[in-house]
Image (tube, helix red, strand yellow):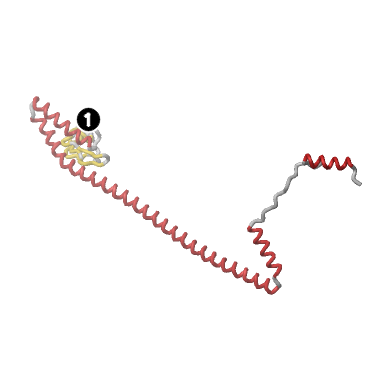
Amino acid sequence: MTDKNDMGTEKEQEINGTPENCGEEKTETAPETETESDKTLTQNAEEMDAMDEPRLREYAKALIDGLTKENEILIKEQAELKKQIEKGNSYLDMLAALKSDFENYRRRTNAQAENSEKEGRLFVIKKLLPVLDTFDRAREMLDEVTMTTFNLIVRQFDKVLADCGVEVIDVLGQPFDPATANAVHSLETDKEEEKNVVLEVYANGYRYGDKVLRYAQVCVGV
């Protein structure tokens, strides 16, 4: 027989809509989802379990044959890739050689152009040197008024030559040096300090850098 108090308690719980353990929060664990890889492995395992030994051997042989073929394909592809890499490296070597040849050609061309320009300039300058000799001789025959104008012309001419890198070789009063002067005359002297010294310059010598364009024509004391 059911106690009235118990029945009252049950009814009260039903009215409130909460069981005795309603204060505890229920947590439900979500079921783990099976991945495609897991499904495949499970399926393969089930199929292998269902196979008898002959079929299992046949399956293993087919699997090994398939892997062997794939390995052969990979080996061929690797060999072909190696050939392509070697071919590419050979092209790079050819390109480097061509670049080096071009740089050498460019340097030679530039050097030849500079040398041609230099030789052309020296050719013109050598043709002008006799004009300078004429200027020097003309100074002795000009009057003072004309000399002023003449010297202006000569200085302009000298400046042009200097801008081209041409300079007069200073030999007067210097020890005779056959590398820069020709002794066209000698003069006996009793002064020891004048022996083997340039006493007079008949025609100036000129140099372009380290190159002598014309040797000075001089008289040397002996």
**Mark 1: few/some/many CA within 10 Å (<14, 14-19, 20+):** few
In the image, residue 155 sits, relative to residue 68, either above or below, namely: above
Q: Position of residue 214 (x, y in %)?
A: 20, 41
**177 or 31: nearer the viewer:** 31
Taking the image as drawn, is residue 222 in sight?
A: no
Q: Which residue is drawn at 90% across and 43% down?
A: 3
Q: Which residue is drawn at 20% across and 40% down?
A: 215
Q: Which residue is drawn at 18% across and 38% down?
A: 217
When asked about the image quadrant of residue 151, the answer is: top left
Q: Where is residue 63 in the image (x, y as percent from the top left)?
A: 62, 68
Local SS, label 1: loop
Residue at the spot of label 1: 191
When asked about the image quadrant of residue 154, the answer is: top left
Q: Where is residue 34 in the image (x, y as percent from the top left)?
A: 67, 56
Residue type indicated by callout 1: Lys
**40 or 66: nearer the viewer:** 40
Q: Where is residue 219 in the image (x, y as percent from the top left)?
A: 18, 36
Q: Is residue 100 left or right of residue 66?
A: left
Q: In this view, does 127 lie to the left or right of 45?
A: left
In the image, residue 32 sits, relative to residue 79, either above or below, namely: above
Q: Which quarter of the figure is the C terminus placed in?
A: top left
Name the residue at the top extreme. 145
**128 or 45: nearer the viewer:** 45
Q: Is residue 172 left or right of residue 89?
A: left
